[in-house]
Image (cartoon, rainbow, N blue to C red):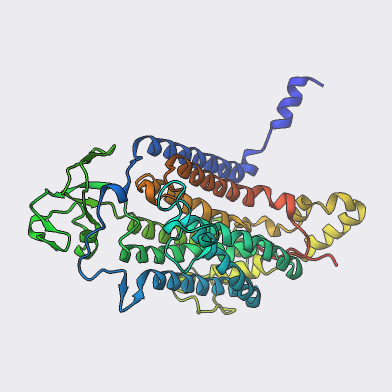
Amino acid sequence: MNIKDFKINKISFDFKRDKLKWISIGLWASLFIVVIVLFSVFWATKNVNWTQGDSFSEPVHWGGVEATYGGIGIYPMAMTLGMIVAILFTLYKFWKKGLNVTELSIGIAICIPISLMGASFFGKLNADSPGVNANGVGFWGLFAFWNAGMAIHGGVYGGLLAGLILFYFVGRKSKTSMLVYADAIVPNILLGQAIGRWGNFFNHEVMGAPVGVVAKSGTWGTLSNVKWEEVGSHYKFLPDWISRNLMVQAKTDGTLSNGVSFNQGDLVQLSPIFLYESLSLLAAWVIITFIIPNITKWISKKPWKVETGKYNYSLSFSIKQWFMPWQKSSDQIQSARDIWNLAYFRNIDEEAKQEYLKSLELNRTKYLKPKEINKANKLNKYVSTKAGVECFAYFFAWNFVRFFLELSRPDDHLFVMYDKPLSLSLILISAMIGLIGMIASQYWIPILFRKNGYLYEKEYFSIN
């Protein structure tokens, strides 16, 4: 055989047959390149090194925006509200996936305390200065989550570690992939984070680098009595109750790498990155929850076209059900969501199962491998978003947003206090793990770790 011909034959493919696969690979590769370029360019051009505590006063308090009202702290209220909203939507996801709510209750009881301790540990570690923890506390004091000083990365990774261990054993008992639990729980953390950032606003924290001087020294009064007629704003599109609470007094003279110069006593406005993060994370949650699970349905074969005459698909009813999810399909009119559930997600291909069982009798070693199990469960070759993609999308989206905002945060409010290169590097690594995890969950994990009789993106048929 000619060596050249052999190589050509080995790499030849039918583009018409594999078109969707190659388009998908091209899109993933393009996204990967764009992300790397964005990270590199912004790190090189938008990074601002500054310290808030040494150079500026506490922000102006205007319009009744305070950390506490009658002894009730807004920050813990916002965090609690965020947790409740995240839990409520997780309950909905558990119901939608047919999971046992008792398992979620156990997870909440175990993971939330560990998450709080993890957030406290990283929030207080080196908080006052390099080597000096918040209020000088010792090792055990780092875990006192009832005291001020929390870092979301510590909370997420602490809770994640506990959740992985717990749901690994729970999943083995219930024959449900750990990735299914992760998809139902993890993305909803974005809701808690988006709501919790408003607690930071009332605490007058999570502000970005100065964007400009809004009043010169000696012209605007004092922090407790500002002459607002003398004060401008770089955020005229924001309401006063937000923009005026972004202003601080400069303690020193200085010029930052973003070109902003100020003198001692000037009134300076900071960037509202708490607002940017809240809105960005909310948008990310919408994308992960409503677009990512459905995007594969949009590009896949449609069950009502594959099995002609079996379903009564209605576009108008599908749109109606999107806005009113309690609406149910009937035999006469059916939505795309309900048809997909009937045709794929809650359907076992008995013919494929019998073919698989015959193949298993002929070569048990080969057909018990995850790759063959995955192929046998591809009902009508429908394309679906695989278990794990939504979970990893959370880590990508959250760290993608956090990376760009971290460039503007002061050195005394970073993920890793007083070490911005390390902080940015860890956030970048987390984002890339999320992106790679999305690709792996969609293409690689299904052919490496699937088992018969387990629930993944759909229930795989049992051979017992």
- The residue at the point 73 percent across, 20 percent down is 4
Above or below 37: residue 142 = below
In the drawing, does residue 50 fall left or right of residue 36?
left
From this viewpoint, is residue 422 visible? Answer: yes
In the drawing, does residue 262 fall left or right of residue 284?
left
Most foreground residue, 446 or 7: 446
In the drawing, does residue 106 fall left or right of residue 417?
right
Residue 244 location, x and y as percent?
20, 60
Most foreground residue, 188 or 92: 188
Most foreground residue, 280 or 317: 280
Q: Quadrant of the N terminus?
A: top right
From this viewpoint, is residue 310 visible? Answer: no
Residue reaching furthest to the right: 362
- The residue at the point 92 percent across, 52 percent down is 362
Most foreground residue, 163 or 323: 163
Residue 310 location, x and y as percent?
64, 70
Q: Quadrant of the C terminus?
A: bottom right
Above or below 250: residue 78 = below
Residue 252 location, x and y as percent?
22, 44
Residue 279 location, x and y as percent?
37, 59
- The residue at the point 60 percent across, 65 percent down is 304
